[in-house]
Image: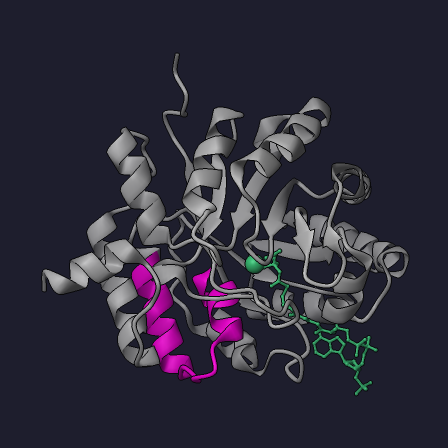
Amino acid sequence: MKRWPDFVQVKEVGPRDGLQNEKKRISTADKIHWINTLSDSGVKEIEYSSFVHPKWVPALADANEVGRRIKRNPGVRYSALVPNMKGLELALEAGIDGASVFMSASETHNRKNINKSIDETYPVLQEVIQSAKDAGKHVTGYVSTVFDCPYEGTIMPDQVLRVCDRLLEAGVDDISLGDTIGTAVPAQVDQLLSEVLNRYPSDKIIMHFHDTRGMAIANIMRSMEYGITRFDSSIGGLGGCPYAPGASGNVATNDVLYLLHGLGVKTGIDENKLQEAAMFIQSKLEKALPSKSLAYAASQG
Ligand code: HMG
Ligand code: MG
């Protein structure tokens, strides 16, 4: 029985999800150099920054300059996080191919993260999605806390489906399901994906695992068994949501590639080029990043 796909698309979210939670500030010039290196690795999508309020996420306050100055590789979709119409305006000025809107399946996390109830969020995102589509942009809808919420505990699949339905009705091209605090184990992936894939085709679904407890690789394996072929990851395992206590980094792109390439799954990404980008940002952050395959590569010089 074939249990994994021939090709998997990996979206690099390090410059956004990764840096948004880092205390040490990276200069705009270093971000640009880093994103340009990532652009040459064969990755097909990079979430390069976030057009949220700079008071809420100061580490990404230079999103506009980053967007204007990065070299655009025609084979790469450059996307950014956008919470509302103000964010979309700024993102369009800076240049995006894709807008990522976001909300939570959990009421409390939604309020903490974007200062609105779930019901208040829909009309805001509907307008953003419609306007981004009118401007010819790809739109991804992130749904956070799809397994567990740091405030409310277990989240049931029907809470997730309710949000997905509304985002898809509003016109998002695809949905990224976030294990925001990295609590899920494969049985939870089974429970959610069996319901989600009953309702939507697998090519609409992206899985976004944080790796707080080291379960992300197991969860990716499980997701592939359900036919999922798209994953978000962050170089070196950088990251976390500043409004989700206990959330650590995304699953490391380096580790995901080690797994996929070892299984014979193609990604189109050059692992060496990616390690180079990971070493660069690690040196700028002046700390070891969590990725085990990065640590191994670094130990080999
Ligand atoms: P708010 O304070 O409710 O905003 O924040 P508001 O609409 O009331 O506006 C207040 C002021 O902010 C106004 O200015 C607006 O113009 C300004 P004033 O009139 O007072 O001078 N403003 C903005 N300025 C710049 N850019 C904007 C913007 N919007 C309003 N976009 C808001 C609401 C959504 C803006 C705020 O809550 C926010 O920025 N939240 C972002 C939180 C965040 O970035 N969280 C992390 C990302 S999500 C994540 O990591 C999860 C994910 O990875 C998936 C997973 O892991 O599950 C995606
Ligand atoms: Mg995230």
Can you see residue 144? no
Does 106 sit above or below residue 31? above
Q: Quadrant of residue 69?
A: bottom left
x then y, percent, for residue 18:
47, 66
x then y, percent, for residue 117:
86, 62
x then y, percent, for residue 164:
75, 41
Q: Looking at the image, which residue is at 10% across and 60% down?
A: 300
| Main secondary structure along the magenta-highlighted residues | helix
Does 297 sit above or below residue 262? below
Q: In this image, 275 relative to 175: left or right? A: left
Does 199 sit above or below residue 89? above
Could you say which is closer to the camera, residue 263 or residue 123?
263
Q: In which quarter of the image is ligand 2?
A: bottom right
Q: Looking at the image, which residue is at 61% across and 38% down?
A: 188
Q: Looking at the image, which residue is at 36% across and 25% down?
A: 6
Report the magenta residues as a range: 13-38
Q: In this image, 228 relative to 272: left or right? A: right
Q: Residue furthest left?
A: 301
x then y, percent, for residue 218:
43, 39
